[in-house]
Amino acid sequence: MRFILRRLGFYLIAFWASITLNFLLPRFMPGDPVSRMFARTQDRMQPEQLEALRKLLGVDDRPIWEQYAGYLQNILTGQMGVSITRFPTPVTEVISSQIGWTLLLGGTALVIAAVVGNLLGILAAWRRGSALDSALPPVLVFIGSFPYFWLAMGALYLFGVVLGWFPIRHAFTDGLEPAFTAEFIGDVGAHLVLPALTIVLVSIGGWMLGMRNTMIATNSEDYITMAEAKGLRPGRIMLRYAARNAMLPSVTSFGMGLGFVVGGALLTEVVFAYPGVGYQLLNAVQGLDYPLMQGLFLTITAAVLLANFLVDILYVRLDPRVRSN
Amino acid sequence: MTSVILQQPTEAKAARKTNRGFIHGLITNKKAMTGMAIMLVFIVLALAAPVLFPDDPSRITGMASLEPDSEHWLGTTAKGQDVLALTIHGARSSLLVGLTVGFASTFIGILVGLASAYFGKFIDEALSLLTNVFLLLPGLPLLVILAAFLPPGLGTVILVLTVTGWAGSARVLRAQALSIRSKDFVAAAVVSGERAGRIMFREILPNMASIVMGTLLACVIYGIGAQAGLEFLGLGDVSTVSWGNNLFWAGNEGALLTGSWWVFIPSGLCIALVAFALALINYAVDEVTNPRLRKIRKPATTERGAAQ
């Protein structure tokens, strides 16, 4: 329990840090980007909306601590202003309409990469020097060396443009009505293949090598020898004895991996014009939509922190040493 | 990327000897040699770029979207620039930024890691908290936000990448420094009244040289990849020629949709080759310092569990 509380405190501090960063950035950046934005968009806004945005982004004359208190209050009550590129939709509404797509894409890719990568790592460590162990890691490391977006571009060109197997942009066919029908779900699935595949390809090598290296250390433990001496089946020793104990670092990586996938998904989303938060973040940056940018960053951070917290809770369940401390 | 480093702590007495063994191990390691050979080729190309292509690489030299032929070995872009010239000149900016970011973030990592381990207590708590917060903040979105607010330019790119990149190395280096901090020879140095700076940099640091090298390589890989990503999004310095910017323009000019594969393949391949070469060297460092990960020489006498 103490462990959980400590972690919770840490995540709260991290979240506070990202809010504060968000608060400071528009206020202390040279060149006053926010004024430029206002100069461009002033005529489209209502006076009270303009006033609210000025307060949010620091173009007002109140003392800085007062601004800070007001800012914290706004963020914690979910008031993030209105989006400028999608005027007059509130920022929170824009984000909530898009976070689902990122969770779908990032989640699918992360789960596939983690499960397959860990299994490959287990097998590779179990059969040291086999073809799987000696040939696959260099190949995966090489693929993992490619930039996310470049592999995505390659996949788009090869499978989308040349072969025409999969759709090349958006999350579902334009004009199709979102609904829980087989047709729509199939369409979403087809649009998911290429973006998810590129993320899986790039990240799988890290999972495999991490698992393999931990597993090699576990394989030389005495209890493995003991299990062999008892005459247990190799498959059972591999999965229930060795892999089970080598799993812990992978669980931690899973939490960290989520942040990584959100980042990687940003580039992949841009290549495939996939309507997730990453794609929207870039649009916001290009449209100088600072309120939306800030809202998106906070949402992404909050999601990553929450995921890590859930992993911590899982960790307590998995590792008795954490519980007893 | 997850790479598990299981490093045996090095004893002070044996430090010099181990270091020689370390370099010997790297030279005889196939992975390390391959990686270094690839890196050498790129460094030579980057240095020789002004000699090979004395003209401004973004100058228009031919018809638009030409396929590779004898005059333009890698074809031309949609604007009519020579892709080979762009790619070779791109190496300069990409390697420069990657190396600068790598060294800068490793340097910060060393400072934070050593200070954490040496001083302990409150300083360790505070620095670890800072490190962990930076580790947890999603890197690329943070990069995008920072780049959006800062004025565009090469300096901004380097600054932003260093700010987002140092935390990983700080964590690894702190863990290693902590284990060395608890050794007798450090205690002896403390008792004999040596200054903190001397103990940190002359006693502790030399004993974690291999980890520092591994971290440096990882940071350079990060720097090159993240710069390319940032530039691909159009958030870098669009006026310079670099691999990331080449890809940005390739995407912008619709090279994919018109089928000009020769425009986007070279720059991406170069990034991948450099990252792969550095990763190879990194794995080699791991193998040399951790005997368990080394290749098994005779499969007949493998470790237990290998063959049943």
Image (tube, grey):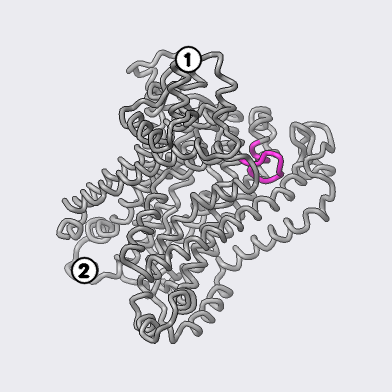
State the image quarter where residue B168 is shown: bottom left
Total labels drawn: 2
Can you say which quadrant of the picture contains the C terminus of chain B? bottom left
**Pointer 2: what residue?**
A223
| Residue segment shown in magenta | B236-248
Of residues A21 and B34, the one nearer the viewer is A21
Do the residues under discs 1 and 2 have CB atoms within 8 angstroms?
A: no
Identify which amino acid the numbered label 2 is placed on.
Answer: Tyr
Identify which amino acid the numbered label 1 is placed on.
Answer: Pro
Of the residues tagged 1 and 2, which is closer to the observer? 1
Q: Is A9 rendered above or below residue A276?
A: below
Q: Is B133 rendered above or below residue B122?
A: above
Res B206 seen here: no
**Pointer 1: what residue?**
A47
Q: Position of residue A281 (x, y in %)?
A: 49, 31
Sort mark 1 into few (<14), some (14-19) or many (20+) by Cα contacts within 10 Å: few
